[in-house]
Each structure stands twice: as structure tokens, then as C-alpha cells.
Image (spheres, grey):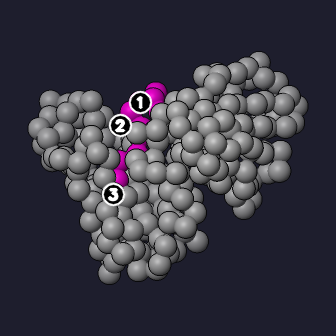
């Protein structure tokens, strides 16, 4: 059974750094073809892809956010970490992590439940 | 970025109806398109990949078609559990981009 779960703070102040952790089970990020991505959704709005890291350490970041975001993996813990600097109220959203299979394109077949992060002073 | 445009933004339908949702890409994406279903407060669920390949466990009343720039998600015999918001996503190139969503509401 494949599961993913996001964790981290649900309230951050503007300019602070946000670190979100995705803990997953049922698959490994050492397996060829596997990746974990991050997608966010502002309240009442559409989905926005943020970042993705593959089994071979290839990292992809949303170009417009590249200077603020980073993504890392810890295969021993089955975790992927998204770090976002200089948070702004516009970053308020539900953040999801999800699994992708490279050869199937960049669709996401299993998702975490999401974590709502509010940016406010 | 490849812009994805869905239409309509919302549709009212009754149980048993057929619903068609369209997704258009600004440039060709071949068949690299996925469809998701999202219910309020829940994560999206992958329904279709590769424009027309149904994910395991997805009811056969869902179908996808299209290639190039124009794609369609069809729901036949709409069921109560199908009332949700549907998103398309191009999986052709980075960054992956989503449509703005289509809400299927109860008439």
C-alpha cells in the first residue's frame, strides 16, 4: 500500500522559511523511474506544480520560484523535504506531495492528504 | 510554460447524464495529458493518463480522448460520487501545468 503524508508548520510569518516534509511508504526513491513531487493549491484555486525529485537525484523546480525553493530526499528515511524561503501571504495554500513515475510522464498517481499552510503576521 | 485551458469552468448535470469536459493546450503535447478528480477537502485523484488510459480502479464510465492540443474527458451515466472538480494536466514538459478546473455540480 502506497501512502504519502505531509508535515510541517501550518502557520508561518512573512519572510520566514518554510520546511515541509513528505514521508512516504510502499515505494522507494531508490527504484528506477520513481519521483516525488510537490504541488500546491491556494484556497479556491487551481493546482500549481512546484518541484520534483527523481530516484537519480535529478531535481526540477518551478522556474519562477527557483530562487526560493529547494527539494531534497532522504532515501534512508523515505522522506522528501521542500524548503521555501521568504514566504509571502500569496504562498498561503494547501501543499501536497505526490508520487510520479518518470516513464509515465509527470502525472501523479498517489497523493498525500495535503497540509494547509497559512502565511500571516 | 504550456497554458492549459479547460471548458466549461462549471457544469450542472443530473445523475445519469453524460458530461463532457474539454482541455486545450496552447501548443502540442501529443498524448501527454492526465485527468484528475478532486472532491472538497481531498487530494486530487488520478483518473486518466496518456490522454486515454484509465487508471486501475477507475470506473469505465470515465473516458478520455484527444491528442495534440485538444482533449476531452467524458463521464457517462453520471453518478452521485462523480460530483467534483476535474483538472487536466500536461505531462509533456516541465513545468507540468494544470488547467483551471471544471466543477461538475448537481442540477
Q: Residue at x 27, y 30 (%)?
A: A90
Determine which residue is flagged by label 1. Answer: A43
**Mark closest to the chain's N terminus, 2 or 1:** 1
Is residue B81 shown to the viewer in this render? Answer: no
Q: In the rendered view of the protein, which quadrant contains the N terminus of chain B?
A: top left
Front of the two marks 1 and 3: 3
Q: Disc number at residue A60?
A: 3
Q: Residue at x 82, y 34 (%)?
A: B78
Report how far apart the C-alphas of labels 3 and 2 lie in the structure. Answer: 20 Å
Asked if residue B68 is positioned above or below residue B105 in the image, the reply reads: below
**Mark closest to the chain's N terminus, 3 or 2:** 3
Question: Which image quarter: residue A2?
Answer: bottom right
**Contact check, label 2 and label 1, Cβ < 8 Å:** yes
* Element assignment for label 2: strand
Query: Do badges 1 and 3 share one subunit?
Result: yes
Q: Is residue A93 left or right of residue B44?
A: left
Report how far apart the C-alphas of labels 2 and 1 lie in the structure. Answer: 6 Å
* Element assignment for label 1: loop
Determine which residue is flagged by label 2. Answer: A93
Tag count in the figure?
A: 3
Q: In the rendered view of the protein, which quadrant contains the C terminus of chain B?
A: top right
Amino acid at each position: 500500500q502506497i501512502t504519502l503524508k505531509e508535515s510541517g508548520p501550518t502557520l508561518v510569518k512573512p519572510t520566514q522559511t518554510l520546511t515541509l516534509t513528505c514521508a512516504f511508504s510502499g515505494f522507494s526513491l531508490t527504484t528506477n523511474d520513481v519521483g516525488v513531487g510537490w504541488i500546491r493549491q491556494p484556497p479556491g484555486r487551481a493546482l500549481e506544480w512546484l518541484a520534483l525529485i527523481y530516484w537519480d537525484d535529478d531535481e526540477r523546480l518551478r522556474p519562477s520560484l527557483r530562487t526560493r525553493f529547494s527539494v531534497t530526499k532522504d532515501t534512508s528515511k523515505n522522506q522528501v523535504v521542500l524548503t521555501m524561503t521568504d514566504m509571502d501571504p500569496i504562498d498561503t495554500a494547501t501543499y501536497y506531495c505526490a508520487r510520479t513515475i518518470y516513464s509515465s510522464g509527470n502525472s501523479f498517481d498517489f497523493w498525500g492528504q495535503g497540509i494547509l499552510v497559512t502565511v500571516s503576521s | 510554460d504550456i497554458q492549459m485551458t479547460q471548458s466549461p469552468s462549471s457544469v450542472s448535470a443530473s445523475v445519469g447524464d453524460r458530461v463532457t469536459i474539454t482541455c486545450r493546450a496552447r501548443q502540442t503535447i501529443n498524448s501527454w495529458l492526465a485527468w484528475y478528480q478532486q472532491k472538497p477537502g481531498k487530494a486530487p485523484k488520478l483518473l486518466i493518463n496518456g490522454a486515454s488510459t484509465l487508471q486501475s480502479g477507475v470506473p469505465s464510465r470515465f473516458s478520455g480522448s484527444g491528442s495534440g492540443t485538444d482533449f476531452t474527458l467524458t463521464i457517462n451515466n453520471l453518478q452521485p460520487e462523480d460530483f467534483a472538480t476535474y483538472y487536466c494536466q500536461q505531462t509533456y514538459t516541465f513545468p507540468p501545468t494544470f488547467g483551471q478546473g471544471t466543477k461538475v455540480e448537481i442540477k
